[in-house]
Amino acid sequence: MAGMTEPSAGAPPVLPPTDDLDEVERRLASTSLLEAMTTQRAVRRVLPDPVDERIVRRLVEVALEAPTGSNGQNWEFVVVTEQATKEALGRQYARAWKVYGGLGRRMRTDEQTRRILRSVEWQVEHFTEIPVLVVCCLRGGANLPFLPVPSIAASSHYGSVYPSVQNLLLAARAVGLGGSLITLPLWSATVARRLLGLPFTVEPCCVVPLGWAKGRYGPKARKPVDEVLHRGRYGETLT
Amino acid sequence: MAGMTEPSAGAPPVLPPTDDLDEVERRLASTSLLEAMTTQRAVRRVLPDPVDERIVRRLVEVALEAPTGSNGQNWEFVVVTEQATKEALGRQYARAWKVYGGLGRRMRTDEQTRRILRSVEWQVEHFTEIPVLVVCCLRGGANLPFLPVPSIAASSHYGSVYPSVQNLLLAARAVGLGGSLITLPLWSATVARRLLGLPFTVEPCCVVPLGWAKGRYGPKARKPVDEVLHRGRYGETLT
């Protein structure tokens, strides 16, 4: 893509699956922050092998280290491994992808985007084979008394779940689990609520599918920082 | 706070200010992911000493390693160091805090919350002394053609900026800069847009104030993971 830095070689090796919690802890402790961030990418192709529930619990535990507005900690995480629920969410994903994927194919045609589209297609087609789905939710809505006035209410609201989602993804990267951040399986909040037994006060925000990585983590294409960095006022570039 | 794990001792030492980019890189590379995540907390009390612009640029660069919906990379970051802009945003912050801070003082009275409230009060009162404000923005709105249907549009939208904000905060932690995530200075998007010269298509989402940490990073109070982790369906706990 024009203006992007191309991903270079040097992707870290794929870590083998494990159910040894000590090994998981070692992987978490031995990955540097910089390495985790720079090699994080959406890894959608994963092995069907089960992922130990205690590992998922540990990843959610470190996700909870993230900030929330007014330290409200109004997050909820539903871990889905049941075939029936995965099938139902997968049907939602496939229906939504039919609309938005088609749109994407028509709108963007560079190789980088085609690669992403193929990887999403894999995920849609193999959704029920993905061992774990973590559905990240928020209790309360944009009308909670502790949340600010409308113009920034929505931003403050979602700002209380996505930092934890990013922790979850970074920790998955460190442990060797493939992860990605998707919302299309939730395009009908009503269906998602029914499937997951969520009360009306709990909003499903996104899904993080997890499985042992088949695809590689590694560098990815990004715009140069100076294209999106402004000094003092929008349009005035830094340095 | 009931049900919270209390912050234990063992906070990492406060790192001294630096304008040596090699030292910044060493700090980024030598911090483990786990350490950065577990010791991240809102550090609002910062020194008035300037922060080298190149360090801020580097932090934004690693923020860009985060995922965005459809890899849209529709983020924009405005770095504010000018006194007049800080004063104007600070006035917005103080006005909004008068309403919401008062609310908070009446609603929650445990020691943990009082500590947070005092720290926010410090930030409101010393806002113009904070050397750098990074205003994190999104181009386009929830009505972009590539974004999904209404029910998850807002979540997908903000899901394209807050993972990068979390990267920015984790990197600030590693480097020794105090950072926090706030939205109240933006409670009037109109005022914020005018101050920052943002076009109508660019939405200011949150502010990350940065300065050399006076307060400490370290452990913080969090609910136990099993309180927010559900297995298969909401309410069914894991393990």
Image (cartoon, coloured by chain):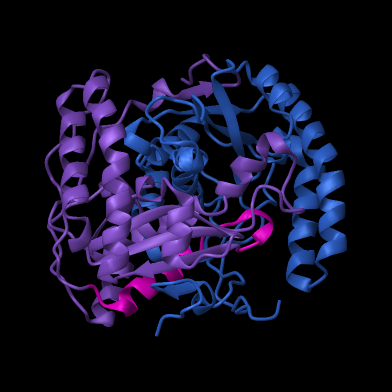
Chain colours: A blue, B purple
Quarter of the C terminus of chain A within the rendering: bottom left
Residue drawn at x 33%, y 25% as measured from the top left: B224
Residue found 62% across the figure and 61% down from its top: A216
In depth, the one of A22 and B55 nearer the eye is B55
Give the residue displayed 42% in from the left and 58% down from the top.
B167
Bounds of the magenta segment:
B51-73
Position in image of residue B155 (x %, y %): 60, 41
Is B231 left, or right, of B110 in this rendering? right
The picture places residue A58, in percent across and down from the top left corner, at 42, 36
Which of the 4 image quadrants contains residue A34?
A: bottom left
Left or right of B204? Residue B74 is right
Vertical position of residue B162 compared to residue B57: above or below: above
Q: Quadrant of residue A8?
A: bottom right
Tally of marks: 0
In terms of secondary structure, what is the magenta stretch mainly?
helix
Most foreground residue, B27 or B137: B137
Image location of residue B219, percent across then percent down? 22, 41
Relative vertical location of residue B124 with respect to residue B105 in this rendering, above or below: below
Q: Does the magenta stretch include residue A167?
A: no
- Residue pictured at 72% horizontal, 53% vertical: B144
Q: Does the magenta stretch include residue B72?
A: yes
- Can residue A88 be seen here? yes
Q: Is residue B31 visible?
A: no
Residue B239 percent location from the top left of the image = 46, 20
| Quadrant the N terminus of chain A occupies | bottom right
Horizontal placement of B188 versus B22: left or right? right
Q: In this rendering, is residue B79 above or below B119?
A: below
